[in-house]
Image: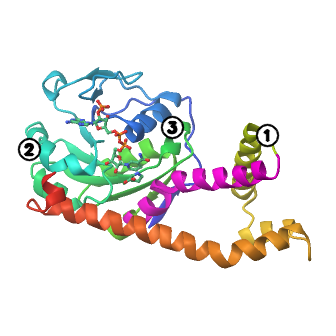
Amino acid sequence: MSVVNVTAGPAGSPVLAPSIWFVGCGNMAGAMVEGWRSAGVDFSQSVAIRPSGTPVPGLRTVQTLGEAGRPPELLLLGFKPQMLRELAPGLANWVTSRTAVVSILAGVEVATLRELFPRAQAVVRVMPNVACAIRRGVTGLYSADADEALRTRLRQLFMILGLTVECTNEAELATIGSVAGAGPAYVARFIEALARAGEARGLDPQLSLTIARETVFGTGWLAATTGAEMDEIVRRVRSPNGTTAAGLAVLEPELPALVGRTIDAAARRGAELAAAARAIDSPEGAA
Ligand SMILES: NC(=O)C1=CN([C@@H]2O[C@H](COP(=O)(O)OP(=O)(O)OC[C@H]3O[C@@H](n4cnc5c(N)ncnc54)[C@H](OP(=O)(O)O)[C@@H]3O)[C@@H](O)[C@H]2O)C=CC1
Ligand SMILES: O=C(O)[C@@H]1CCC=N1
């Protein structure tokens, strides 16, 4: 596994994106488009395909594959994993030896994608998170068959959206999905819990939420900008026999196990999604 960059690449220098079909462009692919557009990426050759026809700002949006135009360089799968088996045969007709299939589908393995898109130039799995919208995302990349030119192109594109990690195997990508892909939801729940506790002790609800959010943001920013170890941050805050020490005495025995079980559950679900996509005759795979 190798980290490509730590913070987002520079904005401002216009990058012409390859021609991309965003097949499904909801919360996650939409966040990626938002981040790229805010950095000046030019999507004039790309198209979003959404059955609802809901426009994606900055992208020509169509409802069907037939309206999309010439086959793209990158076919980006942005729908739910459970739809893969239904959608793949229609999509495969548009895949040529010059098309790379780029999947953000949680769980679904390269072997499954390769079987469904036998003509593709390459199959690439990407595991981003929603903070890509503000270019502070975390994205894992994995491919078994992309050539160096394609790897460089994808690296350059994803670096724009934040931290980018090239994985050497799919297990690493799956772990990034469980920790960072799902992570914003866990962190949002932690902020909410902190806010509720403040509220329970008399703070105005909105103010308490703002305080909790800024505490998490400020701590993350402090750690990211100074490179301080977590133990060091704790040491700077915890006075001997003070208020923090009293709070941590409750939190520390519970938190690692709770987070561990949380990530284990996400990982198990990822494996189930992978199995369902592999097996045509499984109830979920056929759904
Ligand atoms: N949300 C996240 O934080 C992350 C999600 N992912 C992965 O991203 C993928 C999408 O998730 P998410 O964005 O949350 O889901 P959304 O429900 O927000 O988006 C799903 C998209 O799929 C489209 N879609 C539905 N049916 C079809 C169809 N028949 N043909 C083409 N497109 C279709 C929807 O179209 P319409 O807009 O018209 O309804 C929508 O744009 C999943 O595979 C998930 O595993 C990966 C990492 C993080
Ligand atoms: O919940 C999911 O399955 C997707 C993948 C990571 C975040 N959302």
Residue at 56% over, 33% down: 11
Of callouts 3 and 1, the N-terminal one: 3
Q: CA distance from mark 3 to mark 2?
A: 30 Å
Is 146 left, or right, of 29 in this rendering? left
| SS at circle 2 | helix
Position of residue 81 relative to residue 132, above or below, is below
Position of residue 286 relative to residue 51, above or below, is below
Contact flag, marks 3 and 1 (Cβ < 8 Å): no
Is 125 left, or right, of 246 in this rendering? left
Q: Amino acid at mark 1?
A: Asp
Of callouts 3 and 2, the N-terminal one: 2
Q: Nearer the viewer, residue 244 or 150?
A: 244
| SS at circle 1 | loop
Membership of 247 in magenta stretch:
no
Mark 2 neighbour density, 10 Å: few (under 14) some (14–19) many (20 or more) = few
Q: CA distance from mark 1 to mark 2?
A: 54 Å
Residue under label 1:
204
Residue under label 2:
89
Q: Nearer the viewer, residue 207 or 129?
A: 207
Position of residue 36 relative to residue 216, above or below, is above
Q: Is residue 144 visible?
A: no
Q: Amino acid at mark 2?
A: Pro
Residue under label 3:
133
Q: Amino acid at mark 3?
A: Ala
First to last magenta residue range: 174-202
